[in-house]
Amino acid sequence: MNNNCFDTTRWRKVIIAVILILSAAILCFSVIRRGNEKDSETSAGDDEIQTQEEAASETEASSAVESEPETKSETEELIEYPAPEYEFTTEEVTIELDGVDEEYTIAWVSDLHLISDFEAGDELGDVHAEYLDALLERYETLPVTEDGVHANELWPEIVKYLNYNDFDGVIFGGDMMDYCSNSNIALIKEGLDSLRMRYIYVRADHDYGAYYGGVFFTETEAKELHKAIDNDESSNKFWDMGGFLVLGIDNSTKDMPDYYLNMVSEVLTRGKPVIMATHVPYEPKLDTYAASLSELSMQVRSTIYYWSTSGELYNPNTVTSEYLELIYGEDTAVCQVLSGHLHASWDGMLTQQVPQHIFDPAFSGSIGIIHIVPKG
């Protein structure tokens, strides 16, 4: 009796244990199966996401290529710069240099004496009313071509001419405006901003001055206005063209300060020929040329209108004399001096080594072209 009960109980326990083991096995199998299915779904999802990312990346790359801006040369090739309507005269200078293996062409524009504050007296702009008559007379007699085109009308044509011919650079040699005013600054800046090439803008007395009825700026205030154009820093008026240097001498109607002389001296010791661009010319040290320039200056300006120990307006002090000796010296690095200011053309020699060319004023419709070519 007791043995049968024991056997029955034992078999029940065995059956229950087997059922539990089978249930556990089935449960584990289900969990594992679900995990594998989830991993498979995740893997498929990752593959889909990766494919989408790759597609997006390819689209962005394609878009970047399509929207990438063209290079400057490609852009310039697409731009057709219009020819000027005004027929300019040109004044050409050729400079032969050792160490130059190709030709460069640089334009020269100076003495435009632009007046833009009014048109035929209708708008005063920055002009004081009490000076209007005097300024109108100057407007009608100085900054105007022989065929009646005023400097403010000529300036856009000058910019067209420069862009149309695509020079290697342009030197604006001073007196681009007749006096400093907001209107003159704005008009000059508008033209310079549309140039397709580098430029040096050498300032002179009229660029900074409040002459002939302009707003009475101090020189400091005028220089601040000029910074709106190109920052107007003397040290920026310098090009290294590889085989030669171009250096603009700023504010040359005044004696040169010490700090400027130090900068110029450093440039002249770089071992390359230097083309010097200034507004006010220099006195020749050779008698024949000295007499020639003196005669022309008295004829046009009724005074010695260049730096000279025999002059009154531009009699150099010690620092300026030291600067001039850097040009006059036999071992000078200066290979050419270019200038304006006289309102008449002159070409000659400062010394046996250094030529000087003075350009006609731009208000006459003249533009200078400087050819730098290999020697021989």
Image (tube, helix red, strand yellow):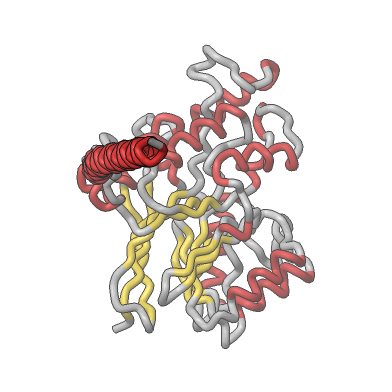
> Given the current orientation, which residue lies at the most extreme bottom position?
331
Considering every residue shown, the one lying at the far right of the view is 318
Rendered location of residue 144, percent (x, y): 44, 34
* Camera-nearest residue between 198 and 375: 198
Residue 207 in view:
yes
Q: How many labels does the image show?
A: 0
- Of the 4 image quadrants, the one containing the C terminus is bottom left
**Residue 312 drawn at (x, y percent):** 73, 58
Point 76% across, 37% down: residue: 218
Q: Residue at x 49, y 19 (%)?
A: 119
Residue 121 vs residue 196, the one in the foreground: 196
Q: In this view, does 128 lie above or below 335?
A: above
Quick one: which residue is furthest to the front in this view?
1
> x%, y% of residue 116?
52, 27
Tell me which corner region of the image, top left, top right, bottom left or bottom right, holds residue 226.
Answer: top right
The correct choice, above or below, for 177 with respect to 330 in the image is: above
Camera-nearest residue between 89 and 260: 260
Question: Which quadrant, please, contains the N terminus?
Answer: top left
Please tell me which residue lies in front, 43 or 234. 43
Q: In this view, does 206 lie above or below 92?
A: above
Please determine whether, in this image, residue 148 is positioned above or below residue 69.
above
- Name the spot of residue 189 as percent of width and height, x first: 50, 37
Q: Is residue 202 left or right of residue 216?
A: left
Q: Using the rendered view, name the quadrant where residue 7 is placed.
A: top left
Is residue 46 visible from the viewing direction of this image?
no
Residue at 68 percent across and 40 percent down: it is 224
Q: Residue at x 49, y 64 (%)?
A: 239
Horizontally, is 24 left or right of 324 in the view? left
